[in-house]
Amino acid sequence: MADRPNMPYTDAVIHEIQRMGNIVPLNGLRVAVKDTTLGGYFIPKGASIMPMLTSVLFEKDQWETPHTFNPGHFLDAEGKFMKKEAHLPFSAGKRVCLGEGLAKMELFLFLVGLLQKFSFRAPGGVELSTEGVYGSTRVPHPFKVHAKVR
Ligand code: HEM
């Protein structure tokens, strides 16, 4: 995977967008291949398990302001980018998203490319919201945005 660009604030903003965007709230179904005890819970062989990524992306013990957009979640005291173990929008383990590297590169290029050419704001009277529509994926409610060429 390509090195992280040396733009820590932009990088932190993208990570925070992905955290709050939470576009894959539920992973695919899994089946326990053997009897397992996890965090004090017994999971018998054959049980269906659906990991819930929302639970880590908004975990109150992991994030300073879990429900408020805050790029500072990914910056240390010197403003350097900081990885977070609980940041799992692409899941983890053997079945982690295969497109993670490509998706991260695209998110960076699209966002930076758009911000270089346009400034964005909410049209008059419109209140932007981070609420979304939950299903197997999560999408924002339709919204309008005003883009002005720089
Ligand atoms: C922001 C964009 C994306 C997000 C948040 C995302 C997230 C995820 C998540 C949560 C999973 C489930 C992993 C698991 O079951 O543990 C997954 C699986 C997968 N993703 Fe993505 N994905 C993104 C973009 C992409 C792109 C661009 C590609 C391909 C070009 C891709 C290809 C795949 C594939 C092939 C799997 C199945 C992996 C497997 O089951 O072994 N994803 N993705």
Image (tube, helix red, strand yellow):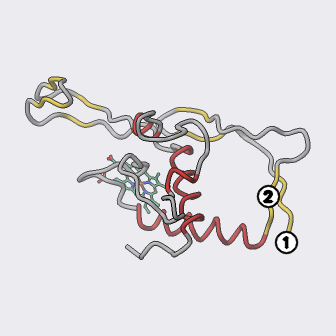
Query: Residue 125, position in %: x, y?
Result: 90, 38
Disc 2 marks a residue whose amino acid type is Phe
Q: Is residue 121 above or below residue 116?
A: above
Work out whether 28 lies above or below 3.
Answer: above
Left or right: 2, with 49 as reference point: right
Residue 87 in percent (x, y) is at: 42, 49
The 10 Å Cα crowd at callout 1, few under 14, some 14 to 19, many 20 or more, is: few
Quarter holding ligand 1: bottom left
Residue 32 drawn at (x, y percent): 16, 34
Q: Which residue is mark 1?
A: 150
Label 2 beta carbon within 8 A of ligand 1 = no
Circle 2 sits in a helix, a strand or a loop, which is it? strand
Give the Cα separation between the discs numbered 1 and 2.
10 Å
Taking the view exactly as shown, the residue that stands out farthest to the front is: 77
Residue found at x 18% / y 31%: 38
Q: Residue at x 39, y 48 (%)?
A: 88
Res 120 label: 2
In the image, is 32 to the left or to the right of 91? Answer: left
Mark 1–mark 2 CB contact (< 8 Å): no
Residue at x 21%, y 29% (from the top left corner)? 39
- Give the side of residue 1 with respect to residue 68, left or right: left
Query: The C terminus is located in which quarter?
Result: bottom right
